[in-house]
Image (tube, grey):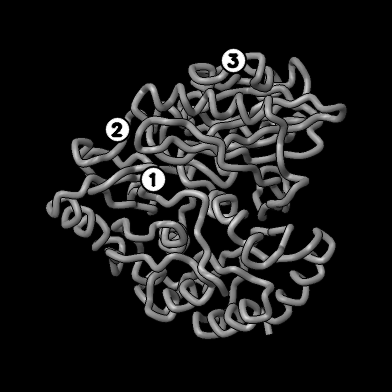
Amino acid sequence: MATLRPQWMAADFFGPRVALVGRLPLQAGPWAPQAPWLQDALSGAVLAFSGAMPTVCAASTATPEILSLLAEAGLPPPSGVLTYAHPGDYLATLVRAAAAGLRLATFHPHPPGEVDPACCAVAPDLIAALMDKARLDEILAPDRLVPRRVLADLPDDPAELLREGPAVLKVATGLPNGGGLGVRPVRTREEAALACAELAEGGHWVLERWLPFERSVCVHAGVLADGRAVYLGAAEQIFAAPFRHAGNWVDGASEVSEAVAKTVVDAAARAAARGYRGLAGFDVGFLHGGGWRILDANFRLNASSTAVLYRAAIHAATGATTLKLTQWTARDGPTLLAAARRHLRRGWLVPLSLYDPAVGSQGGPARLRGVLLAASRAEAEARGEEMARDFQA
């Protein structure tokens, strides 16, 4: 495939003498993915747009075979990759990077016991503040948010959460969070009781009104190294169940209005004024008739960030107008690599990251994340079904 150049590279957001760190902290807390193998797999997502920027990731995501696959797909070859072999080696790798004079761009705030805040390109306390769902009104006008209230305590009777009708309960925390782990629907007394039990460790919470959104779109913005906030694009979210992300559509139908884009960029600019640099994704819910509200803001690399960054380059190189971000698993890395190459060479796939469980000690399935290329959503679904059968064969 022709060389692909994303809309922006990682260095555009962080500047020189910075190492990109995609992994969660070792002490990530209960609202982020817990499986060690998945934490390692996610660390490799940064390789798709790191380029010449030094990058810290698990060795299981940066084998010669995996890097060769990404290069064949046309992605800029990452250089200066700093791999760790296992979680115990992770912090030592960060120490070596800092000792080499590199500041650390951590997408997730690491506690001081893991990373010295003075070594960070963006203050961990700032990232934590921007990620706290109870503080969204610091960067967004209240009328652009879902009607909500902050709870200092959960009620003794969970049914009290339903006093104003169906709702959504969210943990409000500066700890790493994602994947819907800190979010629960509250539409019945049973769901209210379950939400209170499962989110009891939250500390404080946000209770949002349940609104009948027709679709949810992750709208992306970035803050460049010089402090400019820019619009990056949008990706409609696919859910396997409420709050369980299963992929994204990146196409013309996923785009948003200038008003939505401006609201998101303005929020990113407010974060920039406080010292933030990097990527952000804003989850926007759309109602029947065109109304919209912002559900969440994630100041980090989001699941669909790289797909959005590559949309224009992939269209220019292949003519594909529809991208479907998804993931596949297989019993082992070589099987997954071979299947990925077949579909890459058919012009159906651009791989973005791959995890090989045979490297390192974390186990788990082999995991590929990439974008499926098509001319329409219907064609993408048909190709996806065929690819799924191949990956599972």
Quadrant for the N terminus, please: bottom right
Callout 1: SS: helix
Q: Amino acid at mark 1?
A: Asp
Image coordinates for residue 278, horizontal then vertical, percent:
41, 40
Left or right, residue 46 beside residue 330: left
Callout 3: SS: loop
Q: Residue at x 67, y 52 (%)?
A: 248
Q: Nearer the viewer, residue 252 or 301?
A: 252
Q: Amino acid at mark 2?
A: Ala
Disc nearer the start of the sequence (3/1): 1
Disc 1: which residue? 12
Disc 2: which residue? 123
Q: Residue at x 49, y 28 (%)?
A: 268
Q: CA distance from mark 3 to mark 2?
A: 24 Å
Numbered mark located on residue 141 in the image: 3
Q: Residue at x 69, y 59 (%)?
A: 324
Left or right, residue 216 beside residue 261: right
Disc nearer the start of the sequence (3/2): 2
Disc nearer the start of the sequence (1/2): 1
Callout 2: SS: loop
